[in-house]
Image (spheres, grey):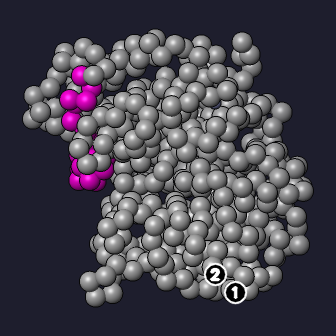
Amino acid sequence: MKTEGYWNPVLETLSFEKLQQLQLNKFKRIFRWTYDHSRFHRSLYDTAGITPDDIQALSDVRHVPKVEKSMMQQIQRKDPFPYGDALCVPLEEVSAFRQTSGTTGQPVYQPDTWQDWEWWAECWAYILWAQGYRPSDRVFLPFGYNIFVAFWAGHYAAEKIGCEVVPGGVLDTQARLLKIEELKATAMMATPTYILRMAEVAKTKMGMDPSKLGIKKITCAGEPGAGIPSTKARMEKAFNAKVYDHSGATEIGAWSFECDCQPHGMHVNEGMFLVEIEDIETGEIIDSPGKSGKMIVTALDRMAQPCVRFDSKDVIEWDETSCDCGRTFRLIKGGVQGRADDITKVKGVLLSPAAIEEVVHSITGLGDEYEVIVDKQGDVDRIKLKVELMPEVTKAQIQDRLKDELRLKTNLGYMIEYYDFGGLPRSRVMKSRRFKDLRKKY
Ligand SMILES: [Zn+2]
């Protein structure tokens, strides 16, 4: 067995039975810790009449009440300030503050102890090692180091595994590209939106060919793009690099990663997280492949503000295949398929914004930027799609194919507006919100 490809050769190849036993033991431990130390969780569990002694098997876990983001939003700014009563350690032990972006309401504050930060970096070390990061790499991080967790833990993990790390914080996009070129960086981490933006700036503003920069691998997070085949292909072509998907969240941690076999999905780090998939309509737990649902996740080792059965709203599905890399951590098919909040019914048809992106980015001649707006005209739902035409093509060459592909992949008709290249606004934030459902109130 080749072990050099694994960060933790024992854990990453543990048999499914042993992995489940480990998850059960760790769940019992974190549940008892949370029950004993968080007043917020204790009241939730007392109301449901459940105690740590009730957890005897993994199938008992599903009876533990879920925690919704809205509950965490309500306890913010309460005592002990500013985290509220889900804090399980004395305030003096908190060494890091982060917060969620607040795109769906009030931000949630996330305290971590130093031990939690080491845990964050350890989770990311699995990701980077699986994606081929090694001590010989020089890793450039082109993100704004601030209150959002973004690639902070990726930075720590790259240092931990021995890479040389270049923090590209306050630089603008052109300065970042010049630094990558000057230092001959071999890897970077960013959101798909920003990766494509960098390629566009290099080509249109600097006369630079990003495929010649020498970047060999790119780790994406924050958006589903690296799991959408056509978006991934655009990024790989632009930088002549392998692009890998990863998914994590402020309140959860870095729970999944694509390995260097690129299996059209991501491994769940089952040694450190317990992932359950819940049927969105019935609330039943889906144990086998073949049906998607939303992820209920437990971070098995996070202590300061625990994540126990958190309703992440990420839509995922178990993959029935195993991966050529030999890891026993299960795969989720195609990565995160979307957010339960964003998957919406239009004219009675379920629409996933990722399916629209897959179509737009699969058509050469359309730019990277696009926007989708769902609204109502009278009583009828309407979807408006705004796309950009590259200078070398005309609307007539594109429109039939775009309409047909959209109809084929999403079963819906669209009102399509065409803009010249550069005509749509470029997102100033790293994560863009290209899908707007005006029928909903955010
Ligand atoms: Zn794999």
Q: Are discs 1 and 2 less than 8 Å apart at CB?
A: yes
Place of residue 402 in the rendered image (x, y in percent of width and height, measured from the top left): 61, 74
Residue 195 lies left or right of residue 290; in this view the side is right
Task: Look at the image and say whether residue 182 sits in the magenta stretch.
Answer: no
Q: Residue at x 30, y 34 (%)?
A: 285
Say which residue label 2 marks. Answer: 399
Q: Amino acid at mark 2?
A: Gln
Judge by depth and name the residue closer to the eye, 96 or 234. Answer: 234
Q: Is residue 302 visible?
A: no
Residue 281 lies left or right of residue 321; in this view the side is left
Say which residue label 1 marks. Answer: 396
Place of residue 300 in the rendered image (x, y in percent of width and height, measured from the top left): 40, 26
Q: Quadrant of residue 257?
A: top right
Mark 2 vs ligand 1: CB below 8 Å: no
The correct choice, above or below, for 295 with respect to 208 in the image is: above
Task: Look at the image and say whether residue 61 sits in the magenta stretch.
Answer: yes
Place of residue 44 in the rendered image (x, y in percent of width and height, measured from the top left): 16, 37
Locate the C terminus and report the quarter of the image it occupies: bottom left
The correct choice, above or below, for 369 with respect to 419 in the image is: above
Place of residue 364 in the rendered image (x, y in percent of width and height, measured from the top left): 73, 70
Q: Which residues are magenta?
A: 60-84
Q: Is residue 218 visible?
A: yes
Q: Residue at x 31, y 40 (%)?
A: 278
Q: Residues within 10 Å of mark 2 (few under 14, many from 20)?
A: few
Q: Residue at x 51, y 70 (%)?
A: 407
Q: Amino acid at mark 1?
A: Ala
The correct choice, above or below, for 205 with respect to 222 in the image is: below
Judge by depth and name the residue closer to the eye, 107 or 381. Answer: 381
